[in-house]
Image (cartoon, rainbow, N blue to C red):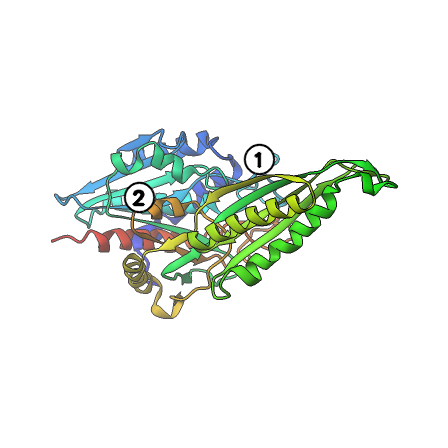
């Protein structure tokens, strides 16, 4: 690893910040304390800040030289609404809230980079360090954009990073094009006519209609969508009825759709709607069809991905960078930022969990798992990557 010595020397301080944030997790748009910690540190280091974008977002502005070029580096700050199983000293102090996705580490890595950049301004232009709220389902990236992020902080490109359990500590993964999937949810209510279960001929049975719809929807993936285009349609809930001898008035289907392209998403949504409506009509039933698009697919830009790849190889060595990492059907709202600006999102390996202190839970160190903890060994690696990325993107004459 080609790490920056002053960042290594500052690791203990950044680790304290990371563990403090972990012990005080805050949910979507509630990151008041976390934002205060970030703002206080940036101000202490002489970095001007903007607050209030996305309600609790914080942006640090690090300038040097005369160039008008700028780069954005983004980290997320929010935690998850789940109970932590760990009992080590920095475990969550707030019941039902936990940093189970490593956003505490993402924030700390970017703070480490900001600290170094504020003292060693070996670049010409502006580095915006963006601390975003509400990634976990709150769409904080889009909220910051709506509040004027790119107008107040004009930049040519933006970059993001996420820790990835199961990949060796400090190894990087990236790929051009689709990296993470779109996240979408549906709720379809089939409205029929209830009756006594002993007299089904007097009913319009919504359960049978729902079953027909559910089975027919699977043909969208197998027969309507090209087999080389990825797509997942999962029905995760079916609700109907309250008694064994009553055919209910309605039945509800709930689930999720994931795709790597908007075109495939458009196809799946339209076919789901058509099948639901026409199937219901065939049985003299009706449907209320609701389809909510949460996050778009995260699509890395080719030029910025190639650029980031070279920086990663310079930090970790080519042997520690996977340039064709397998995309995931998980979603990430950094996708909104990549719809507005060219950029690249990368994974950094979090290891298998051996780093966890005594007192960790019995479960695996996976994302969104109550036994998870961010690997502090990544702090100088991630911070070095951010610094080298900014310096390479904004070279001095």
Q: Position of residue 298 (x, y in %)?
A: 41, 52
Q: Secondary structure at mark 2?
A: helix
Q: Secondary structure at mark 1?
A: loop
| Mark 2, residue position | 114
At a point 60% along the width and 51% down the height, the residue shown is 358
User: Label 2 vs label 1: CA separation?
Assistant: 27 Å
Q: Position of residue 371 (x, y in %)?
A: 60, 49
The reply to whether the C-beta atoms of the residues labelled 2 and 1 are less than 8 Å apart is no
Residue 377 visible from this viewpoint? no
Q: Is residue 185 left or right of residue 361?
A: left
Pointer 1: residues within 10 angstroms few (<14), some, or many (20+)? Answer: some
Q: Is residue 347 left or right of residue 117?
A: right
Residue 194 visible from this viewpoint? yes
At a point 63% along the width and 50% down the height, the residue shown is 235
Q: Position of residue 34 (x, y in %)?
A: 44, 34
Against 254, residue 51 (above or below) is: above
| Mark 1, residue position | 93
Q: Position of residue 254 (x, y in %)?
A: 63, 44
């Amino acid at each position: 690893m080609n790490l920056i010595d002053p960042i290594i020397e500052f690791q203990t301080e950044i680790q304290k910040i990371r563990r403090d944030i972990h012990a005080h997790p805050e949910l979507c748009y509630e990151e008041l304390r976390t934002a205060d910690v970030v703002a206080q540190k940036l101000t202490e280091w002489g970095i001007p800040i903007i607050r209030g974008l996305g309600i609790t977002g914080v942006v640090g502005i690090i300038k040097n030289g005369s160039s008008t070029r700028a780069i954005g580096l983004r980290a997320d700050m929010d935690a998850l609404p789940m109970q932590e199983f760990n009992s080590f000293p920095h475990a969550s102090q707030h019941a039902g809230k936990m940093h189970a996705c490593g956003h505490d580490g993402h924030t700390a890595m970017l703070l480490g980079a900001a600290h170094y950049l504020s003292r060693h301004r070996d670049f010409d232009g502006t580095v915006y360090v963006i601390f975003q709220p509400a990634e976990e389902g709150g769409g904080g990236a889009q909220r910051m954009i709506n509040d004027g992020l790119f107008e107040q902080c004009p930049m040519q490109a933006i970059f993001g990073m996420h820790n990835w359990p199961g990949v060796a500590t400090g190894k990087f993964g990236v790929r051009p094009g689709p990296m993470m999937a779109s996240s979408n949810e549906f709720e379809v209510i089939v409205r029929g006519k209830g009756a006594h279960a002993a007299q089904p001929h007097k009913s319009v049975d919504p359960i049978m209609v729902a079953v027909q719809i559910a089975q027919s929807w699977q043909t969208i993936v197998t027969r309507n969508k090209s087999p080389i285009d990825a797509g997942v349609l999962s029905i995760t809930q079916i609700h109907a009825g309250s008694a064994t001898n009553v055919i209910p008035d309605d039945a509800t289907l709930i689930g999720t759709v994931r795709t790597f392209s908007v075109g495939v998403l458009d196809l799946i949504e339209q076919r789901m709607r058509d099948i639901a409506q026409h199937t219901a009509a065939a049985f003299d039933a009706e449907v209320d069809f609701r389809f909510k698009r949460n996050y778009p697919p995260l699509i890395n830009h080719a030029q910025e991905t190639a650029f980031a790849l070279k920086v990663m190889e310079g930090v970790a060595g080519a042997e520690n960078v996977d340039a064709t990492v397998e995309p995931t059907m998980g979603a990430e709202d950094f996708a909104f930022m990549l719809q507005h600006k060219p950029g690249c999102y990368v994974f950094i390996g979090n290891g298998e969990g051996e780093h966890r202190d005594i007192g960790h839970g019995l479960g695996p160190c996976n994302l969104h798992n109550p036994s998870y903890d961010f690997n502090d060994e990544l702090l100088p690696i991630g911070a070095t990557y951010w610094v080298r990325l900014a310096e390479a993107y904004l070279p001095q004459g």
